[in-house]
Image (cartoon, rainbow, N blue to C red):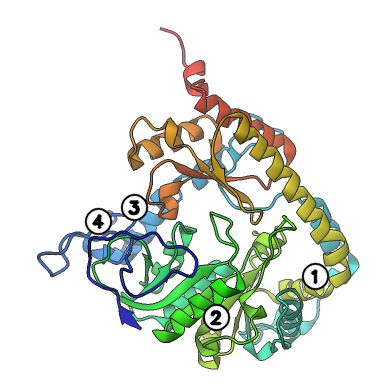
Amino acid sequence: MFMLPQKDSGTPTTSPGSLSTQGLHSNHGDGLEREGSGKPDQKPLKLYGVGDPTAMFSSDSPYLSSRGSIIKWFWDSAEEGYRTYHMDEYEDENPSGIINLGTSENKLCFDLLSRRLSQSDMLRVEPSLLQYPDWRGHLFLREEVARFLSFYCRSPAPLKPENVVVLNGCASLFSALATVLCEVGEAFLIPAPYYGAITQHVYLYGNVRLVCVYLDSEGVKVKGLILINPQNPLGDVYSPGELQEYLKFAKRHELHVMVDEVYMLSVFEESVGYHSVLSLERLPDPQRTHVMWATSKDFGMSGLRFGTLYTENQDVATAVSSLCRYHGLSGLVQYQMAQLLRDRDWINQVYLPENHARLKAAHTYVSEELRALGIPFVSRGAGFFIWVDLRKYLPAATFEEEKLLWRRFLDNKVLLSFGQAFECKEPGWFRLVFSDKTHRLRLGMQRVRRVLEGKSQVAEDAPSC
């Protein structure tokens, strides 16, 4: 663990493998600012960075604590687009509803999943499945997870079920790990841009901060590093050498490393070689390396809520397991997951080839639409999203203008994710999710085009004077 250095004049951009303690900086994000921190020469800190947000919050409800007010703020503010979408979803019965190209979900393979999950081997009820389980997860599931990860992560030796903890998704995993690894107010480093919801995951329970590695820092005690591989929102895949460099950096400074590999089976370009951190011949510091995976992305089951932690540190595993009483899965779901993960023939011969083909086709369609519009973008052949450069559509290069463009999209019934939510340091970048059915993608891209060409549906539908 070390203290981030005080602010200097440089603002280096971090690339994979380039972390060092010299010139390491944090971005404070786009949350609410904190008044003074006790040091008169310090700049105000912000919610998504390293400050103390409770100093800015006086409860707007007589029924909530300051902590409750912050939690409510996340719901009211950070979830605005998602809540608006759920109140007006596009459906056959609601063709003018919102098309969601903002939430990273795979909606391409419901037909395959529904057939597999409806088969008779998935339906089993016995007393042990209806009773309190081992909080780490039923042994039969942890054994299956260990075999599954050994195979698909290409581990050099079989992974052990005693190192597996099962709970309801990676959001809970981030929350649990941050809580058991960090003291209140400590921080994890994270390369930016990054999946912004992690801010909530580590803060709301554990009061742990995220520190982006490329901008100004005021000084904060750093306890660990978060890696997302493949990366969200860029889709970058780390090479074995880059992973080793990150892990060696962390070992030098006794930092924990949380590795999120939730998209590991969603690499759809054959030319992109994926390597799990569990495939490395030797981990530099296995007691501080913690790997998470879930079925939410790779198997299009974000509503099922299944996630798993693999760590050789039994103290960490036990502490996280204690929190699983609040984040556990039902015995029936655990049984279904074990059945699914052990069906290697279906996964390899049916699901993965078809899923990759559908992802690639959807990606190709959206990429061609963006090229036709003359829009630059970043895409690496992994994940469900394209990082789109809409800077030329901002009248001024500000995050206020970025948010206004995002709202125009939403007013025209298409939801995207704006770059500031990912701690992007430059206004005008958006994440566009392509893993959806063709008819919704076509309509969504038509609405995107309408906004960018200035043909706002809101303006068209407004009554004339």
Give the alpha-carbon distance from disc 3 to disc 2, as whole Å: 28 Å
Horizontally, residue 384 falls left or right of residue 416, namely right
- In front: label 2 or label 1: 2
Of the residues under marks 3 and 2, which one precedes in the sequence?
3
* Comes first in the chain, label 4 or label 1: 4
What's the distance in space between the residues labelled 2 and 1, CA to CA? 24 Å
Q: Amino acid at mark 3?
A: Asp
- Quadrant (top left/top right/bottom left/bottom right) for the C terminus: top left
Q: Secondary structure at mark 3?
A: loop
Q: Which residue is mark 1?
A: 340
Q: Residue at x 55, y 80 (%)?
A: 290
Q: Is residue 97 left or right of residue 184?
A: right
| Whole-number angstrom distance, CA of label 4 to CA of label 1 | 46 Å
146 or 172, nearer to the observer: 146
At horizontal 39% and vertical 84% (from top left) the residue drawn is: 253
Q: Which residue is mark 4?
A: 33
Q: Residue 172, image x and y in percent?
A: 53, 71
